[in-house]
Image (cartoon, rainbow, N blue to C red):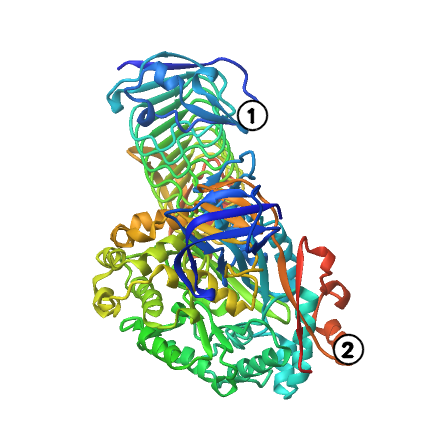
Amino acid sequence: MSGEIAILNGTVFDPANRIFGERMDIFVKDGKIVSSVSSKAQRIDASGRVVMPGGVDIHSHIAGSKVNSGRLLRPEDHRKDVEAKTSTTHSGVGYSIPSTYTTGYRYAKMGYTTVFEPATPPLKTRHTHEELDSTPIIDKGCFPLFGNNWFVMEYLRDGKVEDCATYVAWMLKALKGYAIKIVDPGGVEVWGWGKFLRHLDEKVTYFDVTPREIVRGLCKVNRLLNLPHPIHVHTNNLGNPGNYTTTIETMDSVRDMAGGGKPIIHITHVQFTGFSGSSWLNLGSGAPEIAEYVNRHGHVSVDLGQIIFGDTTTMTADGPFQYFLHMLTDNKWVNMDVEAETGSGIVPFQYKRSNYVNAIQWGIGLELALLIEDPWRVFMTTDHPNGGPFTSYPRVIAWLMSRKARERTLSKINRTARRRLTLPSIEREYTLEEIATITRAAPARSLGLKDKGHLGLGADADIAIYDINPSNMDVLTGKPSKLRRAFGQAYYTIKNGEVVVRDGKILKTPFGRTFYVESQTKPEMESNLLRSIEAKFRDYYTVGLENYQINESYLRNPAKIICEAEI
Amino acid sequence: MSALKLTLRRTVVAPLHLEIISPDNLSGKRWREIGEYMVWEGNRKVKLRNLFKIEGEADANLQDTLIEIVGDMSRGRRIGYRMSGGVIRVREHCGLHVGESMRGGRIIVDGDAGPWLGANMAGGTIEVSGNAGDYVAAASLGTGKGMTGGSITIKGNSGSQAGAWMYSGLIRILGSSGMFPGVHMRGGTIHIAGECSGRAGANMRGGKIVVSGKLPTVLPSFTFEDIRSQTRVDKDNVEGPFYVFSGDNNEDGDGRLFIKIASNPQLKWCEKFLEV
């Protein structure tokens, strides 16, 4: 946090405050947006440039044990992308799994200031926080995994939703987590016994509970706890032909719980679960059907998981899918079972333009973004690093804003895929305000971060200035490479009131905050819970209950968000 | 053919990253221009002219370019990286990764070479008069494809894992070899004229390893096939007779191990399988 800054004459895009490209001044004082500053303020001339709130990434695997395992698995990923030490920055490496410092720098260079790690196995969350703590500049948080948790499945099987809510609240507090993440509900546990879950109503072995019951149960828990972000769901059947029906079924499974005009379920990296067809031969895009459902139902939000052609590292808690990918590619892999909680897998992967399935995947992501009408319910992600590294965001923005950019790539992809996609016929081009919405305002709102994703008075002074002249948009959409350059290298990034990037160069490396949620349940419920889970901890875990919890003092800059639970 | 001569001016302690030293980068360049190139010495960048006395000039024709390096280059890494033609001669020892990803041309090392000699090599030849370290012609860490072409001759001994993940090409080790030659091998030929410490061909799926010296034992995942009087290594006949094993069965592999009978009486037990 520092003194005062005046950003003068910028063209401001702040969709949350209904400011769509107005020329105005933004003032910053002590890390917040204010209405005026003194004459001593640092002046930044933003005339002919675009001013937006700092980017908010709702889903990017940047920290934790699986990310680190990926780093260890792939020295070849680092050799090709080495960053030397400078007077302000640490040395580091990329490419698809950058080291922690490099991750912070690269996000800041793109004008992003808040990033959430979307899948941390509860038992390994201490490691996640250690890595988040060594990721500079950005604010962050993490979503613990609950979709295959033995406690959760037992509570839901027994119909004890309130006990389940108490458990989840305690877990979020104990782990310093932010939201409920569900990955392949029940499927990872079942795969541990050598089987696959293909349908929402199949029973999970030994737990006698179905994926539908897990999703519905945790959705109720989310509501009981008043958590700021809806359940964050990676659906079953990911990566299988025809899985778009599972996605729609999952969204529909909680439709009756909708209310309050806000999404109650977030389907993540929906591209990976947007396949139509019954086999790999007739695989197609299920994006139109998913988009139609999302357009008609306000209780759902999605993020893209757009793929980028090239080399990357896939990593997910969806162990079964990673096993499939390993068998498909014969590539090296890491597979892990996290006791009583979840699993995971890591496989290097290369998306190829000439590959029919990969080309269809590329089209699905963009079709979803372009066919979903409400930009407040579709967020831009690449499910970093699963679809591609986050450094490819400018490329995705160019595809969304420029039909010409899409056509250029379309002309190079697999011909059969090109024929089967709807994408060539879609004319829509995103505007700058829509880009500001899907990359900032909407994810911040979905996360319940009231001071982020906008530039209203009192908001956090997280600001990105891009060297884009809005009066030349026609020229820019005709030259997508210029768009890519501009979004890839922010003219200025201001984080918490400090200039951290100027002209794509890192000037300062402060450490951001780590957000976590404390949903306050009745004290007696938590003490009853602790008594009841103590014995189970001894049975299920190799660690003691006391060592499982992470103290607030363990975090570098904790930022607690308190919610009043209904129980 | 005109020669470019680089003479090391001082003793180097920190690692030197010398991927710039290859005929592809230097052909047709004058010494003055070459001297301005920056290279990493440990954690700082230095100009080539501060490291080397630079004499002569590199030929404009890539294939005729000769680069001679004088001085102990044990700390020098990646000399000849991705070179596709010309000749590099290192008059003394050289360090890690010499000839990495080389595609053509020739590297001659008069002394010893460090580990990862010819890693990921695709073409050209490397000749080492002394010994070589571990991972000769191997796949760089993390990658699954080692040597895919070219040839390496080591007149001394080599370390362990020579030819790891090798797909094609030829490695001749005229001295002895460390453990695991040809580990994960998929194709190509390794000839070890001297002794091999053991585990030859572990996890190999294809290719050929010829051991003329002693090999303490053959991995149990190999199947004894036959006895041959001689075998070919590139264009040469190597006189045997040899025990021939196939494997590695753990990988469902079809690689071949040729073990010279005269040097390995401890393997006589396998001859009983021929009588059946």
Helix, strand or loop at disc 2?
A: helix
Residue at 35 percent of width and 75 percent of height:
A291
Between the C-alphas of marks 2 and 1, the distance is: 61 Å
Which chain is indicated by disc 2?
A: A
Horizontal relation, residue A359 to residue A7: left or right = left
Horizontal relation, residue A450 to residue A295: left or right = right
Which chain is indicated by disc 1?
A: B
Q: Is residue A383 above or below residue B213?
A: below
Q: Which residue is labeled 2 in the image?
A: A523
Which one is closest to the eye, mark 2 or mark 1?
2
Q: Amino acid at mark 1?
A: Ala
Residue at 53 percent of width and 66 percent of height:
A317
Residue toward you, B138 or A172 = A172
Does the rendering let one see residue B164? yes
The image shows residue A74 at horizontal and vertical percentages of 48, 49
Residue B14 - label: 1
